[in-house]
Amino acid sequence: MTEIPRIGVLLFEDVELLDFAGPLEVFSVAHRIDPRAVAAPVTIADRAPVRTFNGLLVHPDFLWDEAPYPEILLLPGGRGVYRELENPPFLDWISSRGQDADHVMSVCNGALFLAKTKLADGDRLTTHHTDFEKLRTLAGTNTVVEDARVTDNGKIITAAGVSAGIDMSLYFLQKKLGSAFALDVARYLEYDWKPHGLAG
């Protein structure tokens, strides 16, 4: 493992913009505040550019073949999740990188990837409220948590819908670097966040 854990954000066609942009901003600001503690996050995709669900074109930092193995892997959600659930190479990439990562985090229905690949067997997962039933169909030994904004299983951390990815990322910083540091990031973002037992 590197001294500063690398943060990789997986992108795909029809990804939900705020699902990845929120955490990306949190970790980018954290890196600017203390580059010795938090690495600059990078985006990874199987193509370039990637079009988000709202039509924004994003050029990833790395394609799959050239991407470094991230110690922290973030899986956003979006309309494209349903298509990628039927894409074996995509799922294989998540499974391979996820097994090697120290932490895998999902936002919104990105949790479906965790259930489908069995990376989260036995864990407590949450997702966007419109995908609770879909997650249950894939969950296996997992427990679907409907009343938590974030669930923390140690290696596997999940966030509820869309904006909850910001809370999850701040929670992760709090967990790893302390409440004061996470509050500094939230203050810079002018995001109303208070450190507490957020995870279910």
Image (cartoon, rainbow, N blue to C red):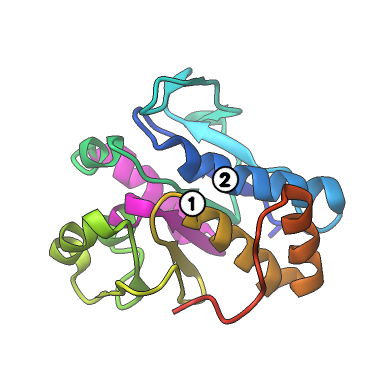
- At x 44% / y 68%, what residue is drawn? 149
Q: Is residue 36 left or right of residue 128?
A: right
Highlighted magenta segment, given as a residue range: 88-112
Query: Number of marks in the image?
Result: 2
> Which SS class for mark 2?
helix
**Looking at the rendered structure, which numbered label has been put on residue 155?**
none
Residue 133 location (% of width, % of height):
15, 62
Q: Which residue is mark 2?
A: 22
The kind of residue tagged 2 is Gly
Q: Main secondary structure of the magenta part?
A: helix
Is residue 1 visible in the rendered structure shown here? yes
- How dense is the environment of label 1, judged by Cα within 10 Å: few (below 14), some, or many (20 and up)? some
Disc 1 vs disc 2: Cβ atoms closer than 8 Å?
A: yes
**Looking at the rendered structure, which numbered label has been put on residue 163?**
1
Q: Quadrant of the rendered structure where residue 103 is?
A: bottom right
Q: Earlier in the sequence, mark 1 or mark 2?
A: 2
Magenta segment: does it hold 107?
yes
- At x 34% / y 30%, what residue is drawn? 14
